[in-house]
Image (spheres, rainbow, N blue to C red):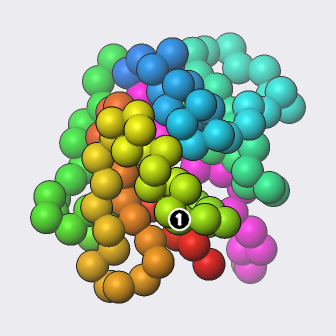
Amino acid sequence: MQITQCLHAALLVTDLQRAEEFYGNVLGLSKSTARNLNFPGTWYQIGEFQLHLIVAPTVPSQIQNPEKWGRNPHISFAVDDLDIAKQRLTAHNYPIQTSASGRSALFTKDPDNNIIELSQI
């Protein structure tokens, strides 16, 4: 067996409208209309990759290292301008932690505390 690409990742969210505000409006992701869901959730298309948000009654915290967010389960997205991403997150009152490695990257948390990495590559 040879894995050839990653197709999608799924994150749990408790409030779909609040999550759509973050992923659609703050991060600027485009919803995918390629799939119809028979349960609460939504898909976002990012190039050939999809992010699936699934509504759940609760989202268990996976944060084991609160001092360094990048050392916890997270999903990473490439951005063309990290400064603009930082300004946008700050304007919407989302927390930011810069990468401890010194890379051009930052971490934030969505409304359910899922950690998101944004890297300028």
Q: Residue at 14% x, 58% y: name it.
A: 66
In the rendered image, is residue 13 in sight?
yes
Q: Is residue 56 visible?
A: no
Residue 29 colored in magenta in the image: no
Task: Decide which of 80, 73 is in the foreground and name it.
Answer: 80
Residue at position x 41%, y 34% in the image: 92
- Residue at 65% across, 40% down: 28
| Residue appearing at x 55%, y 56% in the figure | 84
Question: Furthest-right residue in view?
Answer: 34
Residue type at numbered disc 1? Leu
The quadrant in which the C terminus is found is bottom right
Can you say whether 80 is above or below 90 in the image? below
In x, y percent, where is residue 89? 43, 45
Question: What kind of element bears circle 1?
Answer: helix
**Residue 30 image point, x, y percent:** 74, 36
Q: Position of residue 9 (x, y in %)?
A: 58, 50
**Residue 54 vs residue 79, the one in the foreground:** 79
The N terminus lies in which quarter of the figure? bottom right
Stretch of the chain drawn in magenta: 1-13
Report which residue position mark 1 lands on. 82
